[in-house]
Image (spheres, rainbow, N blue to C red):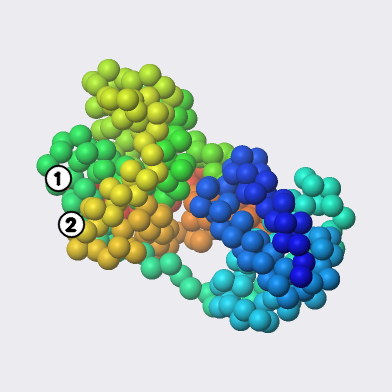
Amino acid sequence: MTDAGDLLAPVAAFETYLSREEGLSPATARQYRLDVLALAAWLSAERRAVQAWEQVGARELRAYLQVHQAAPARTRRVISSWKKFWRYLADVEHLDMQGGPAELKSPKLPARLPKALTTAEVSRLLTAAKNQSSPDKALRDWTLLAFLYGTGCRISEVLQLTLEAVEVDEDQVPVAIRVIGKGDKERQVYLSPTAQRALQGWLKVRRKAGAPAGPYVFTPLKGAGAGQPFPVRTIEQATRRAGERAGLRPEQSTPHKLRHSHATALVEAGRPIEEVQEVLGHASIATTQIYTRVNRNRLRAAAASLPDVLE
């Protein structure tokens, strides 16, 4: 039987590399590690001749997939994990790797549009966020949920938003923000009426509270966490609680669902899909080559077309 230690040796360092150098979330890095560990265990039990990762090629990987017969979505993720691991072994550990996962074809998945909240459901969610016993939590939850929906930004983009990245007009009303998305790419997001009202109200309260030190817009106004961005987990829990009070299902009550709902509302308002992709920062390199980049006036019009659900 293969010595599992030889195969397991680089796996822990692989997870650390993903977290520290590629900036993946702990949950994502852990999942990559588990996928690789499952492969290592199978190789140790079923492929005795394999003594090192350099010996693993597409034939062994296909045999693993044939034995496990996972659903297409899981198979795609496993192959993605392997590709990431192979690149790590080649680029960081400097091993002479075979093609391996690069020679595999990931199964196609049926195209499924994300189910979005209707404007009525978003309004119920925001009302539920506002109507709670703690005034501080009500302000925080309502503001962030309204801003997430009103901008369509990722939760990480919103929580890392800095004061200097907020653009205001001559009346000091916020009109746009600059966010750093995936791949450290910066984009400008014009504020819809919903996002504008939420941000303007928060900044006003923030100034009255004494403007805690730190660059972040959305930070606790007092206590030990003042000056630091709200934790992602805090906003996820707030969204779930508001969803429960609004009578929404758990899968509907997530920050990312508000992003889907923003995009859907723009499409239903008649905005071209290329505008929506630009607003969300969704375009891949291939997409940016295919679609004509829209100008700032059209992006501003796209943001203004989002229905305002605030009372």
Residue holding disc 1: 132
Image quarter for residue 259? bottom left
SS for callout 2: helix
Q: Is residue 141 above or below residue 5?
A: above
Give, as a three-letter code, the residue at label 1. Answer: Gln
Q: Return the x and y of residue 305 as percentages of the image width and height.
A: 36, 52
Q: Return the x and y of residue 142 as percentages of the image width and height.
A: 25, 44
On the question of residue 308 being in view, the answer is no
Q: Return the x and y of residue 210 as percentages of the image width and height.
A: 27, 17
98 relative position to 168: left or right:
right
Residue at x 31%, y 20% (from the top left corner):
211
Q: Is residue 232 above or below residue 119?
A: above
Tell me whether the residue at label 2 lies in contact with that at label 1, contact meaning CB atoms closer than 8 angstroms. yes
Residue sitting farthest toward the left: 133
Residue at x 49%, y 36% (from the top left corner):
178
Image quarter for residue 184? top right
Residue at x 26%, y 33% (from the top left corner):
201
Q: Nearer the viewer, residue 232 or 141?
A: 232
Give, as a three-letter code, the residue at label 2. Answer: Arg
Residue holding disc 2: 245
Q: Nearer the viewer, residue 194 or 269?
A: 194
Question: Residue 100 — which label?
Answer: none
Q: Crowdedness of circle 1 by 10 Å Cα count: few (<14), some, many (20+)?
A: some
Q: Crowdedness of circle 2 by 10 Å Cα count: few (<14), some, many (20+)?
A: some
Q: Nearer the viewer, residue 133 or 35?
A: 35
Q: Please tell me how many numbered marks the rendered image carries.
A: 2
SS for callout 1: loop
Q: Which of pointers 2 and 1 lies earlier in the amino acid sequence? A: 1
Residue at x 23%, y 53% (from the top left corner):
242
236 relative position to 283: left or right:
left
On the question of residue 307 being in view, the answer is yes
